[in-house]
Image (cartoon, helix red, strand yellow):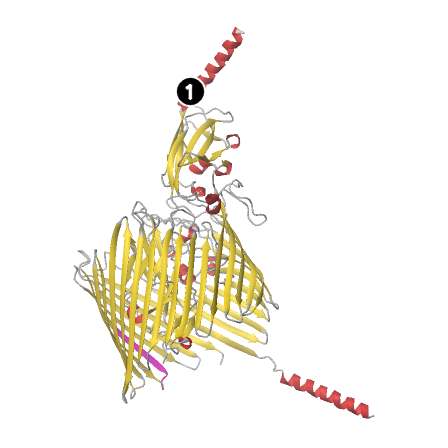
Amino acid sequence: MKQVIINRFCVILLAICFQVAAHAQINANLILNNRPPAYLSDWNSALAGQLIATNTSGINTSVRFQTKLLDANGNTIAVSNLSTAKQYVVNTTATIFSLDKVLQLENMIFSGNIKQLAASGKLSPGTYQLCVQLYRGIENLPLNEEKCKIFTQVNYQLPYLLTPADKTWLDANTAQIAIIFRWSGLVPSALQSVSYQLEVYEVQDGQLPVQAMRSNQPTLVTTLRNTTQYIWQPNLNLKDTAGHVFIWTVQTLDEKRGPIETTDANAKGRSEPRIFGVSVPMVPKDSSSIIYDARCNCYRNIQSK
Amino acid sequence: MLLLKKYTILLFCFASTSLFAQQAVKKPTVSISGKAGVSYDYYGLTTNPSSPSFYTPRRPWNLVRFQFQPTISYGDFKISFNFNFSPMVTNFASPPFNLSRVPGFPKQSFGQWLTNPMNNIGINPSYKWAELQLGTQYLKYSDLSTGDVGAFGYGFSLKPGKLRVKFFRGVSQQAYQTFSSIAPVANFEGAYKRTITMGQIGLEKEDKYFAGFNIVKGIDDKTSITSPVTTPIATPKPAENFIVSFNTKFTADRGWYGQTELATTYSTRNQFAPSSTSIIKDNDPFIKARTSSYRDHAVQAGFGKKGKDWDIGASMKWLGAGYNTLGYPFVQNDRLEYTVNTRFNAFKKKTNVVASVGRRLGSFSTSSKTKQLIVNANVFTQFDDHFSLNINYNNFGFQTPGLMGIKNVGNDLGINPVYTWSNTKMSQLLSGTYNWSKYDEKYLGVTTTNNTHTALLLYVPTFFSMPNFSPDLSLMYFLNQSSLNKLTIYSAIVGAAFKMPKRKIDIRTQLQLNVTKIDPKTPSKNLLATVCLDWKLTKKLTCKNSFTGNIFKYGNELAIPLLGAQYFETMYRTALHYRFGK
């Protein structure tokens, strides 16, 4: 009996020693941007952050991640399944893991409300906590203390283009001297400076507006910081009888001149464009003086003689 | 015998009727309609001093565009060509995002040229209700499915009776490989090849009703980029998207009209993300769930009624936070908007009113919604043969909740009286325009108020003794004032049009002088001269030319060494237009 107790004691002691040794030999440093990309699936980008595992044991060690996603109140939204977690090898030097490997969305068991995530690929705006703990290979032995980092989920709403309103026609007499562009600001307000690149493209005969925007060289490109209005002096002759059709948009750029993420990444932070026309003169008359203009897929008034 | 005679006469009558009928049927002939043309644009820019750069060119130096859009008809058979292309490409807001002008950037391949949004190469042969769609097509099946981007491919549209069956498959974006140049030229992160497949099945009675399903699948070819990059800006991940929508439209006899559309979109942001059904389920057999997949919905509806002199309607649109379609890449989702609009004539049709009021809620799925009010009203009154007055008012108010919330509130009022009078020698038109625009902008707790006043006086005399000469003169004053700056523009414009009917030449000229002052700087001045010449060479062939020169001299708003800088811009366009048919 005594021998059994001694043996058990030795085993427990050995396990404790082993754990202590392991703790000392694998260190994890979780670096998480406090405003990581809004789409969780974009966390493979260096912009999200990374986990650096340092192995001082002298031998390559296989590890698994146990990850938890918590809301601001500490309620668990999702926890990874340790038994099916993928194994990685931590080399004897520092090993860097992108955060998608740590987050392991494919191995998460969701328990909280993920309606927003399922609908948009993004968590609801708010504060969250990501906790990670390293486990040794296939054993359920933790290698370190749980590391937690707080992050803020920000779902930006790009500016809406306010004026000139969509499919409106401006009087060429005034428009050829000044046209005022206005748009709403980026929501929520970014802590850092935001730049708005205003782009105006002329729709040529035979073109459709978005086609013109995607292919033409813009007639106006100007970058403005933290302001949502621009007065454009076109310095163009806009009094042609055929009128001129323009499509305009605003590209929102962060402080590093990178575009704010959009649902379609190819849009590069560009707001939904608006179309306006310039013609002379704008005299609203009866329906006989209204003609269809294919360039804007809209109607415009023409001068009645 | 009599009976036989009767039959013979009857048969003869039938035969002759049939013969007449055959003679009445016109033999189909080949006809051709449409247009063709070529245009050349030249842009020149001279700056003084030539460096450092202070003004960027705003057009390509040279641009040639060809247009060939005839429709050949033979009876029920038609073939439409839509060739509209240019050998020069800039692509500013689509791949390769203006990089084609960077030294070392690979020249576009033939496939890239074909699918470039600059170029349309489309042929649409049709016979009665069947149409083939080949080459570049801009097909908008519905507002929530597809699309305002074109695709190069193949498809068809069948309209037998009330049945509508459509299909198209094409490339909307060709692959562009990643490109690195020597600093400081930016890297290009590449773009995947994108293919869109779409189908529609429905029932339609022209101008009466339509009901149908739309199915759209968009997918990026994840093998089309050989070396995607992750820094400094990552290659956009290959996406996949599937949409089903049901839309209806109707117009009833008593003036009722309406349309609805319900759509579900299923998107995968990154095809390289692991397969997983932990967030959403697979949508077999169309799309498999990945960790980057999400699914959301969208609805739009509009109803109204119109009479002879009036129209009133209401519409709404809701796009869920994950609504996404590769056919409308720039659409902003997570919003709800609704509008009531009306149009009516009053006072024996002398007054025409067009008005609408609406609201847009952004970030709709969150607790901190943005709110925008949109109000437009336009009232036009023709008091008598001499005097008319147009008044318009626009208001938009955008705001976000909280003390540090954003606010963009605009109020615009415009008044435009027009008076015409004449005597035996001439008629004259005097038009005045006054616009007042107030714009409040709140950002990070600080509110800035802009007040803009615009006043324009336009005078157009018409001399009866010189019917081919039309001069005009306008003067304008523009003031934009806020707590941060004051901008004033004075402008004078003189224009004249000359017609030479014998030589079939029309000439229009304009001279514009602007003086722009940004306090406390000294004013900048610019002179803009334009000459346009349209020459009708034959009944079907027209040559159009326009030349604009713009000389701009800055005040002292630019610092040394650009103090007193100036630039000279020239824009010249010449185009030949040919009209097919009679």
| Residue closest to the eye, B359 or B127 | B359
Q: In the picture, residue B464 is in which quadrant? A: bottom left
Main SS of the magenta segment? strand
Q: Nearer the viewer, residue B289 or B239?
A: B289
Q: Is residue B505 magenta?
A: yes
Residue that protrudes farthest toward the top in the picture: A2
Say left or right for B252 vs B462: right
Q: Residue furthest front?
A: B347
Which residue range is magenta in the image? B502-511
- Looking at the image, which is closer to me, A268 or B182? A268
Q: Is residue A226 visible?
A: no
Give amino acid for label 1: Ala
Foreground residue among B346 and A72? B346
Q: Is residue B177 magenta?
A: no
Q: Callout 1: helix, strand or loop? A: helix
* Dot 1: chain letter: A
Q: Residues within 10 Å of mark 1 (few under 14, many from 20)?
A: few
Describe residue B2's horizontal placement relative to residue B539 as left or right. right
Most distant residue in the right direction: B1
Regarding residue B99, the answer to whether it shows in the image is yes
Quadrant the N terminus of chain B occupies: bottom right
Q: Report which quarter residue B525 is drawn in.
A: bottom left
Q: Which residue is mark 1?
A: A21
Location of residue B166 in the rendering, given as x and y in whole percent from the top left corner: 57, 62
Rendered view: B294 above or below B552: above
In this rendering, position of residue B108 left or right of residue B155: left
Q: Quadrant of residue B329?
A: bottom left
Q: In the rendering, at what x and y percent does residue B34 appear?
A: 48, 74
Counting from the top left corner in percent of width and height, residue B134 is at 54, 64
- A294 is higher (above) or lower (below) than A225: below
